[in-house]
Image (cartoon, rainbow, N blue to C red):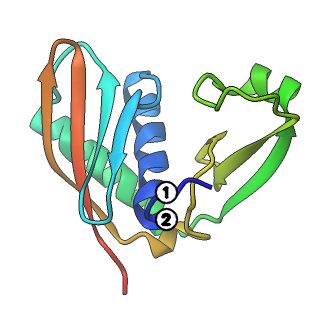
């Protein structure tokens, strides 16, 4: 499994699904996750407004506070190819794909570590956003639960 901070990584899943639902984007094409701060990059057509940043932050925190279970299932590769974007998976002859579910909010192939419940994440906070050459970058932190 890929070694990411489980809280930060699960928050990234929720942020991605929030961007999909609010703006119809794809999942982030690039991300850098660290314990103290992280960032996700999206193909986008413009900068976010301050109100949009607040809405994203509020929606991500609403999902976190629902206390959704985070669990995995394994799906046959042929089925996964029809249901999910498997383009980021390693080039291998995979029989099955690990799908990580954040309650009924998000579901995607993933090889990283996650919390078992969104209530373990803490408070999500967007620190800054930037837009350049069709790329929106969202930087965020977590005020983690102890």
- Where, by quadrant of the figure, is residue 62 drawn? bottom left
Residue drawn at x 63%, y 24% as measured from the top left: 85
For label 2, the SS is: helix
Left or right of 97 on screen, residue 1 = left
Left or right of 124 on screen, residue 101 = right
Residue 35 position in % (x across, y down): 32, 65
Disc ID at residue 31: none
Disc ID at residue 6: 2
Residue drawn at x 78%, y 20% as measured from the top left: 82
Left or right of 14 on screen, residue 72 = right
Q: Which residue in the structure is indicated by mark 1?
A: 10
- Choose between 39 and 105: the one closer to the eye: 39
Residue 102 position in % (x across, y down): 61, 54
Query: What distance separates the C-alpha of mark 1 from that of mark 2?
Result: 6 Å
Residue drawn at x 84%, y 29% as measured from the top left: 77
- Where, by quadrant of the figure, is residue 45 drawn? top left
Residue 12 position in % (x across, y down): 42, 49
């Amino acid at each position: 499994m890929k070694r990411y901070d489980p809280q930060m990584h699960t928050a990234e899943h929720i942020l991605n699904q929030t961007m999909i639902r609010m703006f119809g984007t794809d999942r982030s094409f690039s991300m850098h996750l660290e314990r103290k701060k992280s960032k996700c990059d999206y193909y986008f057509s413009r900068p976010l407004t301050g109100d949009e940043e607040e809405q994203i932050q509020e929606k991500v925190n609403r999902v976190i506070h629902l206390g959704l279970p985070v669990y995995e299932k394994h799906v046959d590769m042929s089925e996964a190819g029809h249901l999910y974007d498997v383009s980021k998976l390693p080039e291998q002859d995979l029989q099955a794909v690990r799908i990580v579910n954040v309650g009924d909010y998000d579901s995607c192939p993933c090889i990283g570590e996650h919390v078992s419940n969104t209530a373990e994440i803490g408070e999500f906070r967007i620190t800054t956003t930037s837009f350049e050459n069709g790329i929106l970058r969202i930087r965020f932190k977590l005020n983690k639960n102890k």
